[in-house]
Amino acid sequence: MTVLRMSSLFLRTLREDPADAEVPSHKLLVRAGYIRRVSPGIYTWLPLGMRVLRNVEAIVREEMDQISQELLFPALLPREPYEATGRWTEYGDNIFRLKDRKGADYLLGPTHEELFTLAVKDAFSSYKDLPISLYQIQTKYRDEARPRAGLLRGREFVMKDSYSFDVDEAGLAKSYDAHRDAYIKIFDRLGFHYVIVEAMAGAMGGSKSEEFLATAANGEDTYVRCASCGYSANVEAVKVPTPAAVDHSGMPAAQVIDTPGTPTIETLVDFVNSAHPRGDRPWTAADTLKNVVVLLEHPDGRREPLVIGVPGDREVDEKRLAAQVEPAAVAPFDEAEFAKHPGLVRGYIGPQALGAGEGSATGIRYLTDPRVSEGTAWVTGANSPGQHVVGLVAGRDFTSDGTIEAAEVRVGDACPSCGEGEGLEAARGIEMGHIFQLGKKYAEALDLKVLDEHGKLVTVVMGSYGIGVSRAVACIAEGNHDESGLVWPREISPADVHLVATGKDEAVFVAAETLARELAAEGLDVIYDDRRGVSPGVKFKDSELIGVPTIVVVGRGLASGVVEVKDRRSGERREVAVADATAEVCREVRGA
Ligand SMILES: [Zn+2]
């Protein structure tokens, strides 16, 4: 196919890591001349980088074309559809907003739910038109507070996003499975190790959500897994198993006691064990009920106090809490807020005063960890300074307004799936894809309805599916490099062969040129290092840094009729007769 001659290729490799680079993919992609930083989180794709990006896109396209149809929406979008779904404000500082010359508001698209929904609404009106799935590969914009790690978290990035439109939930389930299967094929071909983890489902409709995470020690997403049964989940999505209800009819009555000098949970537990011991076993920190107050800021501007009850040996996990209360944001409950709610006795908040229902002293909504289940007995605040209540029983002495999955998940916690083995272990990864049963959220907001088979208008059910395409390039680099440079999988590599001519002998360059042309005629893409006056050492270093899987060296061996063929990944070298070189290299590249 193509011969890229390094004497004229737009490429400068660097010997030093860029100063702002933290992760290997960022260092190597910049050093090897694939990308170049323009501004924080914004990169130029140089010729070699473009070739890799195009290869990744081609894989995504081939598999997506089997189940979906490609279109392309603009990146520059009017405000109105985003206003209709509330996202113009919900996005806050995370989107780039701009005005046209007439003062009308626009944004650079962070995601395109609105546009997909409106496109289908524009064209379709009957169940007979469905199902349909549409996708695009497009540049997206997000004003990240802290762009980092090169392409892994940028402010401009390429994504494949697709949406499925079905008349009912059963249809959505099928569309979801089709995307899941396509994603497995895509990620297998992209050549990195990945796991499929359960993720948080949305607040409105839809039930299933999974993430494809590339396993990476320095990934910024933490997930948990169970070695016994293979369960794996995003930390936000872990559901604590609810213990079976315990009969509390024979339990002793709760008692309010003075608890002087107990500023910490540890001192409180010690005090209660001596002053008011449990019959069967000592009280532990896990038997204390800690009630944490936060302030929810709802999209409509309402500010609502919320109390969350968790076992005292656990903290509230901010990310888990945020995922649970979305689209509301969580703000701290400060001094001024406490002053507005005298019913909340700081440090001694107990469930007796809480709850949104009638008979509650505060009327404040109270949600508890699933471990606070029927019949469990607790040591907790007595809503009076210096006092706690011991043996307060859930379901007898108090109830909550529901459960919330906001307590931290810990290594060793029981597996929610099998409950067996060593419990959960923690691992890290990079989110590469997300498939998501979106439900009716956008269809409702933008009034996307079709007539069903009985002539009745029904709201369309949507699925949402994304792949980080530019992020995939970084992610593949994260998983495929060594101390000398990149080591691309064949299907991703910017070329099939990196041909190096060394020395000053003109015969070497003539033979190398012939070989380059023959390989190209066989349909291979060749990077040919034809630079004169560049030392073999520099050329070898560059070939290792650039990371094409097969390196062919034409040099001193030519006098005895051989060239060297080197496998970039294993480092194995072998000599091949010049006459056989083209056939031999083609065989190697094609894996035959
Ligand atoms: Zn398990």
Image: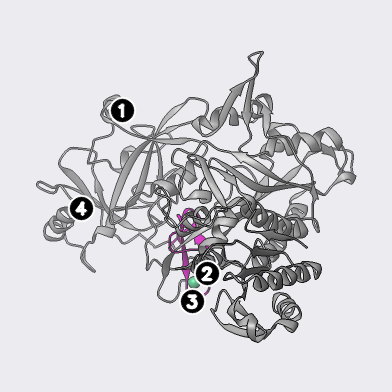
Residue 564 image offset from top left, x and y in percent: 61, 80
Is residue 205 highlighted in magenta? Answer: no
For the residues bearing labels 3 and 2, Cβ distance under 8 angstroms = no
Q: Which residue is mark 2?
A: 536
Earlier residue among tags 1 and 4: 4
Residue 256 image offset from top left, x and y in percent: 19, 47
For the residues bearing labels 1 and 4, Cβ distance under 8 angstroms = no
In-image side of 142 versus 284 (left or right): right
Cα–Cα gap, marks 1 and 3: 46 Å
Residue 548 image offset from top left, x and y in percent: 61, 67
- Decide: is 583 above or below 247: below
Label 3 near ligand 1 (CB < 8 Å): yes
**Quarter-of-image position of residue 86:** top right
Earlier residue among tags 3 and 2: 3
- Decide: is 125 above or below 466: above
Image quadrant in which the N terminus is located:
bottom right
In the image, which residues are magenta? 214-243
Q: Secondary structure at mark 1?
A: helix
Res. 265 mark: 4
Cα–Cα gap, marks 3 and 2: 52 Å
Q: Nearer the viewer, residue 102 or 550?
A: 550
